[in-house]
Amino acid sequence: MLLRDGRIAAIDARLRAPRGARVVEAEGLALLPGLFDVHTHWTPNARPAALPAVANAYLDAGVTTVAAYPQPPEAYAPRRAWLAQVAAPTVFLGARVSTPLGHGADWGDQSTTRWVNSPAAARAAVRELAAYRPDFIKAFTDGWRYNNYPDNTSMDEATLAALVEEAHAHGIRVFTHTVTLARAKQAARAGVDLIAHSILDREVDEELVALMREHGTAYAPTLAVYEPVRIGDPPPADPDNRVLRQRRANFAVALANAGRLHAAGIPVVLGTDAGMTGTPHGRATQHELELLVRAGLTPLQALHAGTAAAARVLGLEDRGTIAVGKRADLVLVEGEPWRDVAAMRNVRRVFVAGEEVTGPDARRPAANAHDSLPPVRLPALLDDFERADGRTALDTLRITDNDGGNDRTWQSSLRIARGDGHGHVLSTHARFSHAERPYAAVLLPLTRGSLAPADLGAWSGITFQARGEAGTAWVEVRGQEGRRWMHAIALQPQWREYRIAWKDFQGMRPWRGEGEPPAWRGDDAVQIAFSVAGAPGSTAWFELDEVRLLEAEAAQP
């Protein structure tokens, strides 16, 4: 095989290496197309969390193309720029659309997951998202929570059909989060390109098969995330508890339905939900091949699901098979994975567009060893709320944050006239949920998409003007990987100027309560948050103006 300019130029048993060509001897190894994973999450809550480390994990596992659900669409441009600096799989980025209080919307605001509950709202959301150039859209259509948790809301068929029609008009494919038979039929009738996750509530039937066949809908069962005991999970303390029993029942249905749909001729493709608990990046993709075999596919059919079939679902005609003219995304493994798919764990060399990225001759860029982008230096003014487009003075998109769940805090943040002739302020009103510790917050991202950290070392603290009424209030500096530092403030109904030194910020425990509060570091900030809390069911309000960084010696407690 001859590779030239990132593609397969020739395949011939009699082929001789041209003069000056680099020769890779691979006798005894198997050559395959690079693997795909059509359902991954590159999130800061996963391990590894940093983009280069995630990329390394996929390359080492022979995965050369992934579809990912990252953070908000605001992060697409900086994320794509970062990916261009490292050796990585080709990463396709998906936007997220759900229903109010639906799955994916019960914890985030609309900068992360758009909320729609009518055909008109769905069309508007797609048009707004199209400006970010998503590679596909993930629609959370199904609120069933596997009999383990209270159900979320679901998307009706008319709304989903409008979403699909509008997305396809923009050249954007639609994948769904769907886990019940009835919702799967709606998704197929709506013409979605891929049903992601397994149908878990009952056996698939001929009606669903006919609908998926008619509309060309593929299926990614993400079996790895449904295993009762997943990769890295400790042995259960009580192997017969209710949740584990339900997981076993769900998994049995998932395996059976993947096998039935494959046997019926529906394209089954490889996706994992990697980044979720028990689905490590890269390793979960290899394991999904083994689970597809457990579901009834042959090893060769499982490999097809992770290569050529997945390429077709993503609309990629240039990869997924080994043929002249195809992109040279290739993997050399030890063993015969078409006989025993577990041999895919024995990756020896990986090539992305003809460049060796894993193996004895691989030379990855220095950026692959860094956990973060270089810190960005900031101007003094973070936000004076004079822009009418929802963006800060740093040209970042303001976002909101509050407790999640079906009973979540209601929050409204609007830019309004200050009333004293001094321009505009941000006015936030909240009605707290009945959660144990309800809160509401406004976040000012310091860089686009909160991806690159900001260097606060040249400044001594922060100043802002605020007023309001709340049980408690505080300002936070939020860093990467969940690091947070806070300083409590006393709000009052009259305007007051606050000046707070960095040295007076206290480290906060991680969100999940694991680990110690972090020591202050000035090169790790991604957001400034203004938060209020109160008794469950109570209300609070606050207004904010003139958020600036302080010169050295200008801060005071």
Image (cartoon, rainbow, N blue to C red):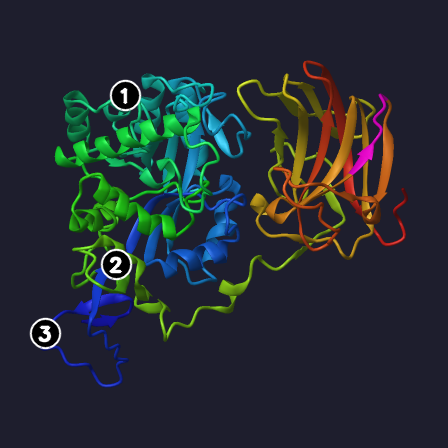
Q: Is residue 427 left or right of residue 253?
A: right
**Dot 2 or dot 3, earlier in sequence:** 3
Q: Nearer the viewer, mark 2 or mark 1?
A: 2
How far separated are the C-alphas under marks 3 and 1? 50 Å
**Dot 3 or dot 1, earlier in sequence:** 3
The residue depicted at 38 percent of the width and 38 percent of the height is 225
Q: Mark 1 and mark 2 in contact (Cβ < 8 Å)?
A: no
Q: Is residue 359 visible?
A: yes
How far separated are the C-alphas under marks 2 and 1? 38 Å
**Where's residue 429, x and y in %?**
69, 20
Residue 382, above or below 551: above
| Residue picked out by circle 2 | 343
Residue 523, above or below 414: below
**Dot 2 or dot 1, earlier in sequence:** 1
The residue depicted at 63 percent of the width and 18 percent of the height is 433
| Residue picked out by circle 3 | 13
Which of 114 and 401 lies nearest the eye of the viewer?
A: 401
Badge 3 element: loop
